[in-house]
Image (cartoon, grey):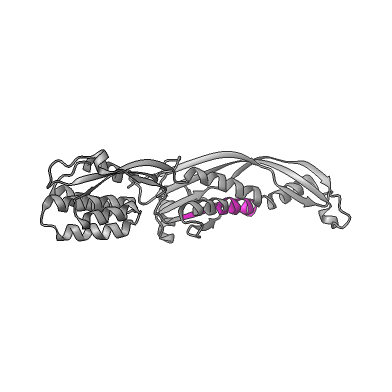
Amino acid sequence: MKIFHLAAAGAIALAFISCEPQYYLLNMEKRGASSSGVNLLGKNISLVYVADEETEVFSNAVATGFAQTLEKELSSGEETIGIFSVPPGGENYGSRDSLVKFLIETGDDVIMLLDRPLFSGHKIVTNRPVVDLGVSADSSYLAEGSASFSLKMYYYDSMGKEDEVRSFSGTNTIHPTFFNPGDLPEEEMISLMMAHSDVSAFQVGAAAARTFKPEWKAVGYTLYYYESFKWEDALELAYQMKWNEALDKWLSLASASRNTQKRAAAEFNIATACHILGNNALAIEWLDRSDADCMMHGSASLRKKILAEM
């Protein structure tokens, strides 16, 4: 969670009668789906790229830049995204069946597949001598090349609401720089340029990954409480963003209460905490329990928030 503010109950809510719960409104910023509509939070991801000898350097660097940029957002830089390569072939790697096979092999939740890039317009823009008497003959010139390309990605989420393959595509131009002897034919210069395309390609992957970066959004939640130490202690823990500790308090209150409304209030808070912690399947279970005991105001709104992330 990024930030949140807890408003005083007296300023935003009124107790209906002394035996009914009071409530706090919790306003916070929460990470959710990316600008692409994809939500990768809490999911295990594998990245596969299709490459042959000609495109291996480029495609590997794109995949590495993509994975490392996402890892910074999803796991604080920890290496959690597996990268795999496959050769081009007759198989349609972008089909649902192929992507499901990859998921079975990796055991992950999400598979993202970078298809083989399609290049056009390779050219050498400049090739100038290096002004350094100590430079070797095979590095006596520094060239800048240019290559335009299109790239397509296929995405399949085994945890998604819909059993479908999504695709994303884009075009760009890279400008690799590389040393050379200055007398190579154009075909060899193009090959040398592509062999040194890794730095530019890494930046391409990093830029593409930002489209899948979780976005922050303002969200409001309701938490119920009663005027007793145990209830207020749980609320204070939530205020301090100690959600697991608050969850333990509400679990204790729910199991100990014979009053259905109090139990429903605790179960509602448990559902809210589970949702904020990213366990939406468990959040729905607790919200169902709360509704069965006593339908709390805000139940429909909370259910809508939970289902939106499942």
Q: Position of residue 153 (x, y in %)?
A: 50, 45
Q: Nearer the viewer, residue 64 or 158?
A: 64
Q: Position of residue 118 (x, y in %)?
A: 60, 43
- In the rendered view, does 69 fall on the left or right side of 108? right
Residue at the limit of the structure toward the front, as seen here: 10
Q: Residue at x 32, y 56 (%)?
A: 243
Q: Is residue 149 magenta?
A: no
Q: Relative to residue 119, is residue 245 depicted above or below? A: below
Q: Relative to residue 263, is residue 152 depicted above or below? A: above
Answer yes or no: is residue 9 visible: yes
Span shown in magenta: 46-64
Q: Position of residue 125 (x, y in %)?
A: 76, 40
- In the rendered view, does 284 fall on the left or right side of 77? left
Q: Nearer the viewer, residue 186 or 234?
A: 234
Q: Residue at x 82, y 49 (%)?
A: 141
Q: Nearer the viewer, residue 184 or 15?
A: 15
Q: Position of residue 106 (x, y in %)?
A: 44, 60
Q: Relative to residue 228, is residue 37 depicted above or below? A: above
Q: Nearer the viewer, residue 304 or 166?
A: 304
Answer yes or no: is residue 303 visible: no
